[in-house]
Amino acid sequence: MRITKKIKDEMLTILAKTYANVKSALVFRNPFELLVAVILSAQCTDKRVNVTTARLFKKADTPQEIVDMGLENLQEEIRDCGLFRNKAKNIMATCQTLVEQYGGEVPTDYEALLKLPGVGRKTANVVSSIAFGRPAIAVDTHVFRVANRLHLAVGETPLEVERGLQKAIPKAQWSAAHHWLIWHGRLICKSLRPRCGECPLAALCPSYELSVKK
């Protein structure tokens, strides 16, 4: 099946209707808490991150308080979140940068976000989109998988998929589409056992027949 612009537009219309009211599953109160939560979310479920941040932010919810906590204590607080040593190192370094260079505030500039320790394009795009209201498409494992399966954007790297989605999706919908694709990946287009029989995009999906035959 050749996926034309018309088919892509139909897919986006269906996704928009299906996931009209979805939002980030992460729990946060401000840009800093969102930034920490997204750093913690690498190879970890949002549900687990929310448990970890709820505990952490009761003890320290500003960059200075986390710096004051110290690296070893921070590691203990996020131990159940996976890759905790590396994440703690990045969060601590980021908090130090925020205190020393930005008055304890998360910078709104995208390039400044990218320079923070532990912050890649995915994290910078999430914070830019959700915290600061800028159009952005963050490519996590769900978005990468769903975009490739639907052929909305085909690529071997997250950056290739991000650029492909930017071409396929109107800029005004970038941030919303990011959530549509994430939730579709979580609920329907799962990694190991996609629920193709329940998928509202089945008739348009080029991967449907291959999935059914497995």
Image (cartoon, grey):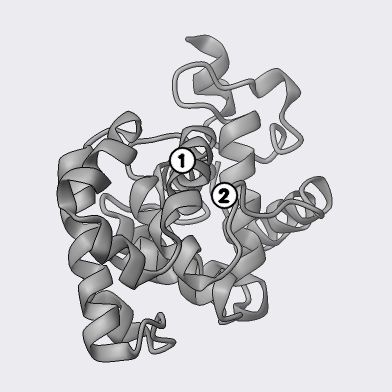
Give neighbour class at mark 1: few <14, some 14-19, many 20+ (Cα, 10 Å): many
Amino acid marked by disc 2: Leu
**Relative to 74, residue 164 above or below:** below
Q: Mark 1 points at which residue?
A: 49
Q: Label 2 near label 1: C-beta < 8 Å?
A: yes
Question: Residue at position x 27%, y 76% from top?
Answer: 114
Where residue 95 appears, as percent x and y from the top left, is: 27, 70
Where residue 1 appears, as percent x and y from the top left, is: 55, 41
> Alpha carbon of mark 1 to alpha carbon of mark 2: how far?
7 Å
> In the rendered structure, which disc, 1 or 2, sits on the residue that comes first in sequence?
2
Q: Name the residue under label 2.
A: 26
Q: Nearer the viewer, residue 206 or 53?
A: 53
Mark 2 secondary-structure assignment: loop
Position of 148 compared to 120: left or right? right
What label sits on residue 209 in the rendered view?
none
Where residue 66 appears, as percent x and y from the top left, is: 31, 61
Specify the farthest residue to the top: 214
Question: Residue at position x 26%, y 53% from top?
Answer: 157
Give neighbour class at mark 2: few <14, some 14-19, many 20+ (Cα, 10 Å): some
Q: Can residue 167 be seen in this view?
A: no
Question: Residue at position x 33%, y 40% from top?
Answer: 77
Mark 1 secondary-structure assignment: helix
**Relative to 81, residue 159 above or below:** below
Q: Is residue 72 visible?
A: yes
Q: Which of 132 and 67 is in front in this view?
A: 67
Question: Residue at position x 37%, y 61% from top?
Answer: 122
Position of 198 compared to 86: left or right? right
**Relative to 208, residue 121 above or below:** below
Q: Which of 188 and 64 is in front in this view?
A: 64
Amino acid marked by disc 1: Val
**Relative to 116, residue 148 above or below:** above
Where residue 55 appears, as percent x and y from the top left, is: 48, 41
